[in-house]
Each structure stands twice: as structure tokens, then as C-alpha cells.
Image (cartoon, grey):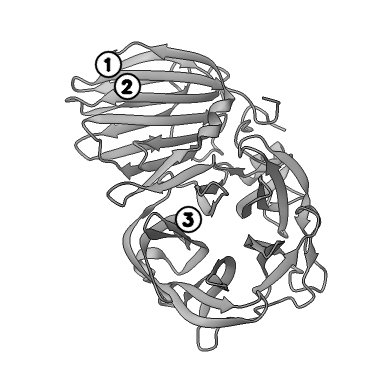
Amino acid sequence: MNLDHRPQYHFLPVANWMNDPNGLIQWKGIYHLFYQHNPVGACFGAMHWGHASSHDLVHWRHLPIALAPTPDGADCDGAWSGCAVDANGVPTLIYTGVHPQVQCLATSDDDLIVWQKDPANPVIAEPPTGLAVTGFRDPCVWRDDGLWYMILGSGQQGVGGLILLYRSSDLHDWEYLGPLLEGRLDETGHNWECPNLLPIGDRHLLIFSPEPLRQAHYYIGELDGHRFRPKAHGLLDYGGLYYAPQAFTDQGGRRICFGWLPEGRSSEAMAQAGWAGVQSLPRLLSLSSKGALEQRPIPELEALRRSHQTLEAHALANCEGTVVAGRMLEIDVEMNVGSATSLGLQVLRASDGSEHTTLLFKPAEGRLYLDTRFASQDPGAEGRLTSAPLDVMDGLLRMRVYVDHSVVEVFANERVCLTGRSYPTRADATGVALLSDGGSAVLSRFDCWTLATIWSPN
């Protein structure tokens, strides 16, 4: 395995392929993360449900595979994405079997280690009649007033994305209630994957991942009977490498979200490394006093902090060179924008600047850029330039930046996130440099910690 690029504090399996987070649940105080997994190769294949548990959402224990395809069963070609619920004390997984796409159940009676598939599978065998759907998968299930509700990701051919709503009294017999929300082909693609719906503040948050856009979208709105009325729209992450997120409510009432971070390199490089796909850091989701979505890293991540470096407040020069270095870092930086035309920082920077990943805020545009086009001299590594709209409050730009070998995950002003993948080839591509151009920007605070691996004891 290539440990130079393998993240050490983002979750991933011991080896092979991983994609969507599934079945997020806290059971008897223990957090459980299931995930789409090919256990026999670092490539997409017949999907299984991998499984891990944690006391703190940070340090994880690998567990046996929870679901595997059953020959001649409803999931014979793959156990695809879904969710977990507490069904009157019985842990229950609801997931999609494929070819054709159908919805299935599995239950456990031993604290979520061994799962028994329901003999009645599939519990939903086909899409509603009269709809030419582009997909029929990824159930999200919740309970309200004694009844179960399910939404499924779908789309109407030639029309756009679609979320289907069902209701049941027992998780087995499901009644189709109609479309929860419909999209437009020219705005949000032809098929919506991995829908999530959960209450947040005095509203509801609807998350979905539209094809072919390969982004994680959200709406904040109101649940009006059997329809969702969107009020605000955005992306959970603007970096272009964050997909199929799943959110859940833990026993403390927190809304927590994980997303899949796909690779940005060739299939040959993934096969050689022996692993592919990473889970994002767990994010806390909340609404601001004005009803805007806020995202923060969970505070439990602070347990990983080790050596600490800080810089005194000072006026920023054009490029200050390397101020700290490392490939497993948390950087908490605050800058007063002043009259600067651009400001930010570089991470994973080689001593001569030949490799670097750049975060740059341009006040005139009101956008924060993540640039990985110069992150690697490997021609098989994908570089991209992405950006997010960002309003700085009181002229202050605050970024929490997490660098974990090939992952760069950024939280800006607690409002927007950008995540990218970087694969430096140079051993000295570890530097962090401050950037400013065209004005009087001031570094008001800079704290940096090296972080420990999640696979070692506290």
C-alpha cells in the first residue's frame, strides 16, 4: 500500500474499494458506520456493506462485513445504499438490491454484528406504475406519529430528478404517496441519488446527489403534508470530490453528516495502492439565526491534536514562504481582508513551489477557490479549480483546514466547505505558506496542530 497518500485520520477500510456512507446510527451509545464496499479489489464491483463502530466518531474499529449479495436473492448483484433504523428495539437495515432495483430489509439481534435478511425481500419490488424512472434506490426511512416513511432517489426520463415518498405501518407493506419533490433536468440533472430528509431547527433539510452533476446538493424548506417546499438551495461541498452524503441525528440531538470522498487519480494508481475511497470528517449541521445552513467539524476531532504552533498577528506579505510543515495537520486561521485583492494559503507545498494546493479568497468576487491543478507532478493525478460563494463577516476570513496526506478538507466561516484530493510526488511537499496580494490584509490568528492517526490509542 502507498502510505504516502493514504489518509490516517479520515476513515477508510483496511484495503480495497469504498464509496457511499450507509446506515449511520448510534446504538446503545456506540456509533455505527456502514459503507459501500468491494472487498476483493480497489475498484467498483458487487457492492457489500462494510461496517465499523466508534465511541467518539473519530477512532474506529473495523467489524465484519454486514451485508453481502445473496446468490439468487433480491440483492444478488449487489447490496446498494440505504439506512438503519431502530424498529421497536430491533436494529433494521433498509437497502437497495439491484438488477432490478428493489428495496430490502435485514435485521440483527446481536448488537449489529450479524444480520439476517428478511425472507419477504424485496419489500418494494418495482417503481410506481406510470412513471418512466431513471433510478429507484437508496432508501431513507424515518418514523413519525407511529408510521414509517421512506423516500427513494429517482428521476423521470426527459424531465429531471425525483424523490418518491412511501408510507408503512410495519416496514413491509408500503403505500406510494406520490412525489416528495421534482426537479428540472437543466438545473439538477436526470437522477437524484442518496436522498436524506431530517428536521433541523424549525425547518427540514433535504440532501441529494444528482447525476450527472456529481455534487451533493441540499434544500432547506418545509415539509407540507406529503410535499417538500424548498426555500433555500446550496451545495454541501464545493470542491467537486464529495458525494452521496448521509446525515443522522445522534442521541444528543446533533445532526451529523458523512460524505464519500472519491479518488482523483487513475484506476491503475488505485489498483497499485490497494485502496480507493475515503469518508469525510464528520460534520455538525445546524441553522444560523437567519436560517442558513452551517457546517462545522465535530469537536471530538480535537482529541487528535498533538504538537501546536502559532504565529503572532501581523500584516501579510505577498508570500511568506513555509511557516509550518506537515501532511497531517489542522490549521485554524483568521485573516482580516482589508484592501487585499486576494489572500489565503497553500498547503502540501514543495520547497521550490513546484507542487502546491492553494486556497485563495478573492473579495471582489466574493468567492473562495480551491486549486489542485499544481498539487502533483504525476500525470495520472487529476487537478481541478473549484470555488464557493463566500460572504466574509466583519471583513474576517476564517478557515479550518484539515490536511491528511491526499485529502484537503476546508471549512470556511462555518458556512461553506470545499474538499479536494492532492497526490504530491515530492517528499518535501509538506509546507504551509500564507498568501496575500494587492493590499493591507492582516493575519489576526494562526494556530496549527499536527494530528494523530485514528488507528492508535488516545
Give the SS element for disc 2. strand
**At x 49% / y 43%, what residue is drawn?**
283
Q: Amino acid at mark 3?
A: Arg
- Looking at the rendered structure, which numbered label has been put on residue 157? none
Give the residue number, with chain letter if any, for mark 3.
214
Tell me which corner region of the image, top left, top right, bottom left or bottom right, holds residue 54: top right
> Pointers 1 and 2 in contact (CB under 8 A)?
yes
Within-10-Å neighbours for mark 2: few <14, some 14–19, many 20+: many
In this view of the protein, can residue 377 be seen by the observer? no
- Of pointers 3 and 1, the one earlier in the residue sequence: 3
- Tell me which amino acid carries mark 1: Leu
Along the viewing direction, whichever of 259 and 361 lies nearer the viewer: 259
Residue 44: x and y in percent read 67, 54
| Image location (x, y in percent) of residue 398 | 34, 30
Per the image, the residue denoted by label 2 is: 435
Whole-percent x and y of residue 451? 57, 23
Give 165 or 188, whichever is nearer the viewer: 165
State the quadrant of the N terminus: top right
Q: Quadrant of residue 434?
A: top left
68 left or right of 400 in image: right
For disc 1, the marked residue is 316
